[in-house]
Every structure is written in C-alpha cells, then in structure tokens.
C-alpha cells in the first residue's frame, strides 16, 4: 500500500509529430498540466461550442491531441481507465469535421451500449460536429438491414423479437426438456454466445468444450435446444438481435453492390471499447472497411469483462499485426481518480497473469491526493449492508450529493439487501440497468405538459406568477406531482419525484447557461437529449452490478461483498476466468474519483459459521495482508508509437515471457488408459466413448436434488454441480466424504456445503443437511 506512484513527466513521453493546421505539438502548460483538462471528470453541463477547429484541440494533453489529429490511416488508442478516451475520440471526430478533413455523413462511430452511443452524440453536438452517425453495432447493422432487405432479399423483413427467452422456453417444450428459470436464462446466454462466435448448432458441443465453457445443461442438449430455437424462428418469421449482425454480414459478403454502396457512404470508422468486440462484430467491421484502413479503435485489455458473451481482447492486441503501419497512442494520465485509488488499481493489475496483463497500462494520477481506500470486515451480509447505508447517510448529511455515491456488487441478487438497508436509513437510491430515463411514464407525461405549456403557456394561469424559465418549469411540473420537498420514504412515489426533480434541476442549469432561454428552447433540448439518451442526473445513490457500472464514475464508491466466492465468483475456475474476475474488480475500483470503501462479510446470515475470507485479489494490497505471488514489474507507460512493420515475437512487442507453470501429471481414462485433455472427460475420468457404469436412478435423484438447491439459492443449477460432475458422482457412487472429495468438480467448499446431502442420496439414507468438515 505504501508503494510510491511514479509520475510520468511529459518530456519523458515519445514526442508527437507536429499537429495539423499549425498547432504546436505541445499545448501550453496552462491548458492541460495545471488542472484544465476535464477528461472523464465533471464537465460543464452546457458548454459553449468551440468557434473553430483549432479551438476543438484546446485543453487536450499531448497524447489526446495526437489521437485528435491522427486522421489518416489506422490508429489504435490504448486507453486506461479515467484517461479521457471518449474525450479524445469525440474531439478527433469533431476536429476532422470542423477542419473540413472529414465529411460528417461519412463518419460512423460504433460502440456497445445505447448509453455510450448517446453520450458520444451529445458530446459531438456540443463540439459542433452534427451529422455524424454514432451508434451501437446492432443499431448500425439494423438500419442497413432494413434499408437493403427489399433489394438484397426481397419481401418484408422478419419481425425483430425483443426477448428471445420465450422462444427458448418454447424450444425446450418442443424438445421435452424441462428448464427452470435459471437454466432458461443460461441456455439463452449460451445461444447468444454461439451466434456471436459464428458457431452453428452442429458445432456447438465441440466449440463449447474448446472454449472451456461451463454449460448449463449437457452440451448435446444445448445444441438440440439451439437447433430447435432456430427452427422456431424460421417458422414464425422472426429474427433476434444476433441475426441482425449475421444477416447484415451475409448480405455484405454475398452482394458486392450492397457492400460498395455502404463503403461509399462511410469512409471513416471509429470503434470504442474495442476490447469487447466479438468475432461477429469484427467480421462486420472488416466488411464495412473493405480494402481500406481508415479506422480508429479505442480500448483497454485490462477492462475486458464480457468474455462470456463472446467478447475478446485479441482483436485489440493484434491490431498492429493486422495493421503494421498503425499509429498506437497510449493514454495513461488518469484524470478521474486520486493517487490513492490509482495505486490500488495498479496494484491489482501488477498481480495479473495472461496476455491482457502483458499489455496492461500503468496509470498515473493527475489529481491531488485523497484518502486511502477503506477496508471493512463485517460479521454477516445484513451487517455489511447496514454499515454501508449508515456511512452513506452520514456522507449525504455532510454535503456529498446522493448522485455522487454508488454501491457496486458482483451479482444482481445482492441488490435487494442494500435496497432495504438504504430505505431503512431514509437514503434515496436508483437501480442501474432499470428503465431508461426518457422512457419512464412520469418523464413522458412531464415532457407532454412542458410542450403544451411552451405552445399555449400564455393562456395558462399556472404560469402567471412564473418570472423565469426555472419557475415556469416548477409551475408546470407541480401539476405532475413535483413538490419543493421530497416525499417521505422510498419506493415508486419517491422514484417519480426524483425523475421530476431531475427535470427541474436541468431547467435551472439550462437557464443559467443560456440567457433568455424559453420553454420552447428547453423542450428542444429535452428532445435532443431523448434522441441521444443523454439523461439528466437523478438524485439518488446508484446501486449497480460491476458489469453495468462500466463506463460510469462517482465521487464515492462502496465495493461490497469483496470476498472469496463472490470476487472471484465461485464458478470461476480456469486461469482465464479468474483473471477476468480480477479485471472486474479493477473496473469497480477505477469507478471511484475520491473515496473508495471495500468491504466483505464473514458469513451470509447472522449466527452463521464465519468461514469466508477477503478476496485473494486484495492480498498484499489491504493493510495487514501478505503479498500474493504476482508478476511484479511495471505496466506500459504513455506515449505514441509509429507504425513500421509487424512485430515478430514477444521480444519485439516488448512483452515479458509468461511465467512457467508447474507441470501436472496427465489425467488418464480409467477404462482405456488414454490421456485425457477435454475438461468434461477429465471430470468423468474416462473418454466420452468409453462405456459408462453410471447408476441412472442415482443420477436422476441427484438432478432433482440439484434443482431444489438451485431454487433455494437463486442460482443456476450448474452453479451447484454441473451435469458432468453429477455424472461422475453417479458413476463413482461414493460412500464417504474422502471418496466424494476425489471427484473433480466437488472441491472443499462444495463438499462442506453439499457433501452430507450428496452422500445421503448416494447411500440411500435420509438427507440431514449437515455440513461436512473436510
């Protein structure tokens, strides 16, 4: 914890070439070194549009300016958390447009969420770069598919289904396969993964095994469900979101005239969050580009947290291999977090392993010092939730806005206990991932009322006493339920009030920024924001999973449940899965600007056995803990690299050789003696083709028991035991805990939790529910 953060001096960085349009390579220190850069931090709500192309570059640091002015050829931006990547790429687009180098209609910027695309459109509008398309991969592909379908396919395009889970349920019914709610969700996710990795049903089982996926049902069953699901879609003339990408790719591959028309429209591409690109999205990008290389990609391999959806950082890490002439810019100046938060973030990655770790970036905080991260251990989960709520209540009382506080957890199931604790403490909150702001019924009604007042306000007695725009808005919204004081308690009434209060606050800020603004001007602003999904700030503590918190930031972050079994999650077993869990915690840590609280509990319920321990990822980082065996060394510093030729080998890339692993004794089939390499076969300790001596009746009893456990715990069935593990148990029919513990997939924790029940089922005794000490 006491390790000193080394600051990178600007003169130590690779000097960028001369900027375009006569701009100096380095802006004066007053514009970026002394606090004027606002990358990834608070920004003016309604900034003035820059009056020239040169003005767009003002306030950028040297590396951001390099990104903004490198408008020709392939560009790869490796951007650490909080380093202003969105600022850099939006200024890049705006500079190109304002300088006349890029035609707005010829630029397509793609990202992964509607919120991120909306934020990009909002920033481009504020920079005076209107007319640029900023969309998600799916949105851009859907527009092209709708436009070209009559020409390329003919007839009416099939209907797009919003939720595929009902179709999966129908496929299960047709196959006479019974799925509980958790299995239904997990099978749906498997189908999505198969489609984005361009895996057909016949190849699913082999592809899943090769990828090391823990399948929710037997891979053959998942493949069967996948095949019937596809048949049902064809029969009902519907497509899903993955089909949008697949069909667009197919049309661009098969119809040269269509591909040429798309390429004539879009000449320049920008891809945000490139570490999250799936093979299917990468193929679509290649078809959009054709033989050209006018593409700028932005990403951070250390923030790859969606591999379960098919995302892979390989496309980012291999960019220089595919484009040897590419310019690579590394952004490491962290404008978001204090040195204390950044030190912890760097410490997490210093212990990481794998290819993404080889390319990690060492962040350098640009902010003044703040408090050290706080670590708290609680007796149980309710005490942890109450402790967090109590601290949050005190922070709000001291003047910290509720909207600048977040509680982040590993799974959505953890949310409920924190909702209750905050409600009991009288703290307003909002759930991240809930209904989008402009889609809320109260916001839609309020927008209609404001629009009517803007048109006919002269005849409305409510506005007689209103002397300015904020008072007019307050008067109109008072008729929709807004009051000067918030309602007591929490729940739906409080949430509606928070939505209306956000509009009132937005009107106040809008009037302060635009002298003489009218209700009609505000309505136009709301329309622009609704189109961009650029929501105003809602006053309430944010509750969010670590996955849904990506791309967001708060002054104060509470990372809760940071214990073994949750971070890393229980079902993360392989080295790759463990490293992704580490990156997930890294994402959580880097959401905090100033204060970071990490906590864990020793048991789930009061009075339970205190068997939990803090996450292994905190070893050596939290006070009093021993250092974990890690990689050590420094990550990459910031700077610019010019493209020359493809790098050859690890030495040319400047990467370290991966640490040698301890060799393991090879697993052999207990029937034929062949060496086993497949994970599923290793669990059974036999080849799939070798005869099984499984007790079918025992297997079915174990499956019924597993469904009951999954229902009680609220987890997918495969998190209790996978099908392969149940098969291995049914084949071994263990008599005691020692025999059960030898079966791959059981392990110490599951032996303690489920051992007594499993042994009772295997030996035909009555289940006791007792915990086995092992």
Image (cartoon, rainbow, N blue to C red):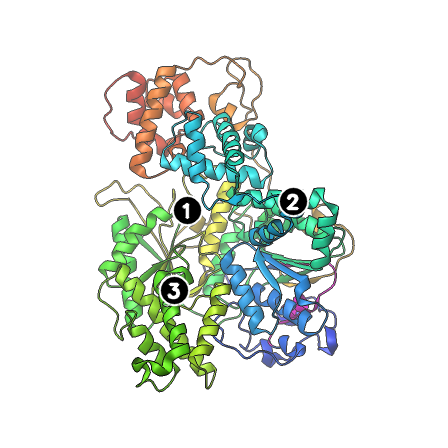
Residue depicted at x 35% and y 45%: 613
Secondary structure, mark 2, is helix
The image quadrant where one finds the N terminus is bottom left
Is mark 3 in CB contact (under 8 Å) with mark 1? no
Mark 2 highlights which residue? Answer: 249
Observer-nearest residue: 347 or 608?
608
Residue 439 horizontal/vertical position (percent): 41, 60
Q: Is residue 69 in the magenta section? A: yes
Q: Earlier in the sequence, mark 3 or mark 1?
A: 3
- Disc marking residue 444: 3
Q: Residues within 10 Å of mark 3 (few under 14, many from 20)?
A: few
Which mark sits nearer the N-terminus, 2 or 3?
2
Q: Is residue 428 visible?
A: no
Q: Nearer the viewer, residue 202 or 462?
A: 462
* Position of residue 684 measured from the top left corner of the image (x, y, whole percent): 47, 21
Which residue is under mark 1? 567
Whether residue 711 is situated above or below residue 690 in the rendered picture: below
Which of the 4 image quarters holds residue 312? top right
Quadrant location, the C terminus: top left
Residues drawn in magenta: 59-77
Secondary structure of residue under mark 3? helix
732 w.r.t. 363: above or below? above
Residue at x-position 48% and y-position 48%? 582
- Going from the N terminus, do you reach mark 2 or mark 1 first? 2
Q: Is residue 705 above or below residue 157?
A: above
Nearer the viewer's eye, disc 2 or disc 1? 2
Q: Please say whether residue 706 is visible from this viewpoint.
A: yes
Above or below residue 154? Residue 132 is: below
- The Cα atoms of the two marked residues, 3 and 1, are separated by 39 Å
**Which mark is in front, 3 or 1?**
3
The reply, left or right, for residue 33 in relation to residue 438 is: right
The dot on residue 630 is none
């Amino acid at each position: 914890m006491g390790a000193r953060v080394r600051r990178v001096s600007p003169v130590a960085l690779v000097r960028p070439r001369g900027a375009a349009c006569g701009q100096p390579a380095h802006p004066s220190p007053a514009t970026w070194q002394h606090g004027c850069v606002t990358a990834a931090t608070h920004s003016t709500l309604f900034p003035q549009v820059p009056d020239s192309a040169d003005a767009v570059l003002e306030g950028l640091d040297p590396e951001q300016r390099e990104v903004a002015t490198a408008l020709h050829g392939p560009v790869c931006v490796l951007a650490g958390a909080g380093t202003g990547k969105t600022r850099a790429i939006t200024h890049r687009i705006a500079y190109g447009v304002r300088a006349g180098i890029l035609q707005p209609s010829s630029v397509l910027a793609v990202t992964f969420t509607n919120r991120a695309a909306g934020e990009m459109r909002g920033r481009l509008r504020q920079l005076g770069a209107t007319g640029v398309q900023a969309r998600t991969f799916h949105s851009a592909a859907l527009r092209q598919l709708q436009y070209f379908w009559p020409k390329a396919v003919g007839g009416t395009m099939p209907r797009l289904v919003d939720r595929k889970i009902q179709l999966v349920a129908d496929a299960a019914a047709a196959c006479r396969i019974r799925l509980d709610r958790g299995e239904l969700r997990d099978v749906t996710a498997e189908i999505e993964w198969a489609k984005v990795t361009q895996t057909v049903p016949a190849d699913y089982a082999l592809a899943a095994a090769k990828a090391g996926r823990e399948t929710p049902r037997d891979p053959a069953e998942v493949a069967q469900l996948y095949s019937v699901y596809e048949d049902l879609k064809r029969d009902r003339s519907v497509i899903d979101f993955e089909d949008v990408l697949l069909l667009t790719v197919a049309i661009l591959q098969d119809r040269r005239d269509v591909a040429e028309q798309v390429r004539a429209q879009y000449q320049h591409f920008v891809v945000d969050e490139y570490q999250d690109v799936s093979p299917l999205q990468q193929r679509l990008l290649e078809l959009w580009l054709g033989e050209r290389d006018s593409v700028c990609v932005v990403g951070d391999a250390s923030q790859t947290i969606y591999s379960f959806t098919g995302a892979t950082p390989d496309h980012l890490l291999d960019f220089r291999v595919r484009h040897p002439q590419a310019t690579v810019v590394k952004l490491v100046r962290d404008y978001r977090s204090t040195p204390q938060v950044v030190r912890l973030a760097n410490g997490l990655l210093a212990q990481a392993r794998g290819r993404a770790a080889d390319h990690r970036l060492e962040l350098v905080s640009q902010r003044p010092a703040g408090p050290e991260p706080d670590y708290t251990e609680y007796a149980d989960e309710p005490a942890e939730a109450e402790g967090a709520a109590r601290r949050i209540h005190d922070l709000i009382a001291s003047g910290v806005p509720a909207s600048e506080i977040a509680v982040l957890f590993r799974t959505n199931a953890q949310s409920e206990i924190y909702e209750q604790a905050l409600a009991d403490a009288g703290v307003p909150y909002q759930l991240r991932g809930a209904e989008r702001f402009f889609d809320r019924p109260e916001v839609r009604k309020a927008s209609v009322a404001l629009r009517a007042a803007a048109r006919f306000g002269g005849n409305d007695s409510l506005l007689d006493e209103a002397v300015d725009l904020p008072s007019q808005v307050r008067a109109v919204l008072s008729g929709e339920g807004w009051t000067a004081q918030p309602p007591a308690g929490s729940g739906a009434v409080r949430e509606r009030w928070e939505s209306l209060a956000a509009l009132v606050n937005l009107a106040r800020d809008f009037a302060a920024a635009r002298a003489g603004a009218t209700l009609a001007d505000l309505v136009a602003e709301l329309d622009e924001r609704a189109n961009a999904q650029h929501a105003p700030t809602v006053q309430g503590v944010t509750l969010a999973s670590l996955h849904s918190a990506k791309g967001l930031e708060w002054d104060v972050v509470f990372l809760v449940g940071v214990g073994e079994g949750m971070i890393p999650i229980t079902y993360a077993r392989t080295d790759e899965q463990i490293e992704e869990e580490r990156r997930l915690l890294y994402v959580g840590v880097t959401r905090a600007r100033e204060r970071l609280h990490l906590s864990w509990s020793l048991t789930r319920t009061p009075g339970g056995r205190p068997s939990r321990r803090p996450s292994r990822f905190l070893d050596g980082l939290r006070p009093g803990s021993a250092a974990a065996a890690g990689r050590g060394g420094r990550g990459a510093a910031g700077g610019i690299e010019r493209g020359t030729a493809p790098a050859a080998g690890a030495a040319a890339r400047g990467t370290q050789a991966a640490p040698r692993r301890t060799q393991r004794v090879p697993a052999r089939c207990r029937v034929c003696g062949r060496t086993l390499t497949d994970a599923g076969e290793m669990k059974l300790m036999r080849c799939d083709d070798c005869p099984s001596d499984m007790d079918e009746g025992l297997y079915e009893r174990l499956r019924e028991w597993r469904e009951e456990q999954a229902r009680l715990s609220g987890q997918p069935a495969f998190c209790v035991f996978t099908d392969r593990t149940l098969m291995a148990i049914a084949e071994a029919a263990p008599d005691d805990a020692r025999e059960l513990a030898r079966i791959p997939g059981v392990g110490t924790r599951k032996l303690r939790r489920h051992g007594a029940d499993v042994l009772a089922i295997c030996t035909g005794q009555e289940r006791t529910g007792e915990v086995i000490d092992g």
